[in-house]
Image (tube, rainbow, N blue to C red):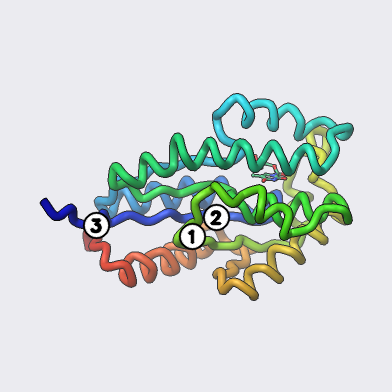
Amino acid sequence: MIKTMQQTLFIVLDGIDGAGTTTHSKLLAGFLSLKGLKTYLTREPSSSEIGKLLRIYLKDERIPASTDALLFAADRVLHYKNEIKKKLEEGYIVISDRYIESSIAYQSSQSDEITIEWIENLNLFAGEPDLTIILDIDPKISLSRKNQEFLEKFEDTSLLDKVRQVYLTRAEKLGYSIINTNNIIELVQTEIQEVVLNKLKEKGIGIKK
Ligand code: TMP
């Protein structure tokens, strides 16, 4: 029996802290569900034991960047193999709030000893997304919206300036869409939806009008 190719898509929203990846991933998942598509929303760090440890380490300044990079990669491979790949095989459109570009941008900015090539190698066993969208905002604006008492270790303007530059340089090199999120949420979400709708069309995935 010939198996027909499944009509799925693996979408990632990535960007610096406060750029709105979580808000926009949720809104996008709602939009795609309304359009009649089976949609699965997930995020990184994932819900695995390594992901839970990473959430604790995000508040701990003593963890070296190389340890972060190794753990994020270990969490990602688990996340991909046990969750994302399975959902794609079941015919879901998968949206991940953060993925490999987070490791590349954050961990390479954390330490001069960490190269993008090394991070790419660590992540070799995590499947590649079909579509990565970078949400972009000036860190001064994004951090001013956060509660200053509960900032995590990466939520610092000078680090985030570096992280942002890596995201933008990679997006340009790899052809990712960059969407500025310093605008009304609905307008930003519409821009994201347009990029996703184009990709769905390109892949021949039909939606409800
Ligand atoms: P979030 O809950 O706001 O998405 O925060 C996750 C934090 O973890 C954010 O500061 C980015 C950071 N992070 C990395 O440094 N490397 C990674 O690979 C991932 C997925 C997240």
Quadrant position of ligand 1: top right
**Please, what is the three-letter code of the amino acid marked with disc 2?**
Leu
Label 2 vs label 3: CA separation?
25 Å
Say which residue label 1 marks: 189
Alpha-carbon neighbours of circle 3 within 10 Å: few (<14), some, or many (≥20)? few
Q: Position of residue 110 (x, y in %)?
A: 84, 50
Side (left or right) of 31 relative to 189: left
- Nearest to N terminus: mark 3 or mark 1: 3
Place residue 15 in its image quadrant: bottom right
Q: In this view, does 4 lie to the left or right of 37?
A: left
Closer to viewer: mark 1 or mark 2: 2
Query: What residue would you read off at disc 2?
Result: 13
The residue at 82%/55% (across/down) is 109
Give the residue displayed 34% in from the left and 53% down from the top. 32
Q: Quadrant of the C terminus?
A: bottom left
User: Whole-percent x and y of residue 9?
Assistant: 38, 56
Tag 1: residue type? Gln
159 relative position to 100: left or right: right
The earlier-in-sequence mark between 2 and 3 is 3
SS assignment at label 2: strand
Residue depth check, mark 3 versus mark 1: number of the one nearer the observer: 3
Whether residue 21 is visible here, answered yes or no, is no
Across and down, in percent, residue 149 comes to 83, 34
Query: Dot 1, crowdedness within 10 Å: few (<14), some or many (≥20)?
Result: some
Front residue of 181 and 17: 17
On screen, 18 above or below 46?
A: below
Q: Residue at x 54, y 41 (%)?
A: 43
Residue occupying the point 24% across, 57% down: 5
- The quadrant holding residue 140 is bottom right
- Residue 5: give its label: 3
Q: Height in image: 133 above or below 83?
A: below
